Amino acid sequence: MSNIKKFRITSFKKNNEILSLEKLSFKFGKKIILDNLNLKLNYGEILGLLGPNGVGKSTIFNLITGLIKPDYGSIKINSFKVNKFPIYERALKFKIGFVPQSGGFFHDLTVYENLKAISEITIKNKRLREEKINSLISQFELNNVVDIKANLLSGGQKKKLVISLSLISDPKILLLDEPFAALDVMTIKMLQKIIIDLQSTNKISIILCDHQARDLLSCVDTAAIIANGGVIASGTPTNLINDIEAKNAYFGDSFKFN
């Protein structure tokens, strides 16, 4: 798939961090998942995570959201350590949005009812609540399915709905776990455009992980390879695919980006 990213935010954002993971370690039983991992997300950046199955990409998201706690290390948002804050406070106070690989919506509720249910938790003013719902319906072109139950939507429509649900609380950081999984080529292109628009229009800093390496690299500013418990290589897509450590751990010698 061709590279659809028209610009990449790189060097001039290096010292402007919104999120940092410092010496993060996590074990599941006796198995070490993360071992002194360091990772940074800059303001306005789209960062992609790649790596073999089971290396801890989804674990990183679970640690950031507060679903699980690290054995060691710090999770900082705007230089403030958030390790002790529960999930709901990280979502509302520290403005973290999360789009899971599957699910993330109420199956038996309509598109409108899903948006209304989440907005009632996060937006107290009824008028502002309706404005936000209508804005998201328009932004994600859900007008024609607003009264359709979520479980009857297409794969692409479900992704649009879940992303719109994650945006109700106006997050500054958005985590997307395998957004391209099990989707057709045209739907993937649509989602890539949505992700880039969220960066440019909504000014959201984004981390996404996916096994579709070309699709991920086509819409990120930078990417990191996760292996052996940490980040073994990172950089722009072009630099990363030429990195010897990245080739050995993930891409191999035959991988082509464009």
Image (cartoon, rainbow, N blue to C red):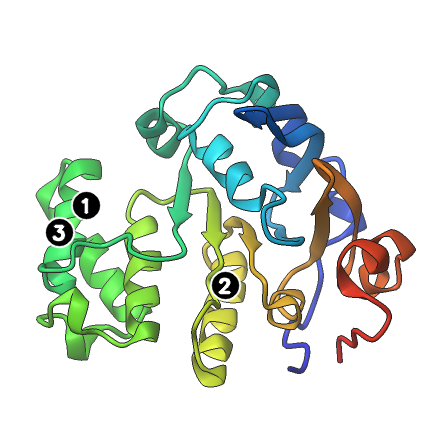
Which numbered circle lies on residue 116? 3
- Residue hosting label 1: 118
- Looking at this rendering, what residue extends furthest in the right direction? 244
User: 242 or 147: which is nearer to us?
Assistant: 242
Q: Specify the quadrant of the image occupied by residue 220.
A: bottom right
Q: Specify the quadrant of the image occupied by residue 227.
A: top right
Q: Is residue 112 visible?
A: yes
Amino acid tagged 1: Ile
Amino acid tagged 3: Lys
Q: Earlier in the sequence, mark 3 or mark 2?
A: 3
Q: In the picture provided, is 173 more to the left or to the right than 134? A: right
Regarding mark 1 in the picture, which secondary structure is present there? helix
Q: Compute the Cα span from label 3 to label 1.
A: 6 Å
Task: Say if 189 sits above or below 76 in the image.
Answer: below
* Mark 1, other Cα within 10 Å: few <14 / some 14–19 / many ≥20: some
- Residue hosting label 2: 195
Task: Say if 237 sits above or below 141 in the image.
Answer: above
Tag 3–tag 1 contact (CB < 8 Å): yes
Q: Earlier in the sequence, mark 1 or mark 2?
A: 1
Q: Compute the Cα span from label 1 to label 2.
A: 21 Å
Q: Residue at x 45, y 81 (%)?
A: 184
Amino acid tagged 2: Ile
* Mark 2, other Cα within 10 Å: few <14 / some 14–19 / many ≥20: many
Q: Compute the Cα span from label 3 to label 2.
A: 23 Å
User: 106 or 55: which is nearer to us?
Assistant: 55
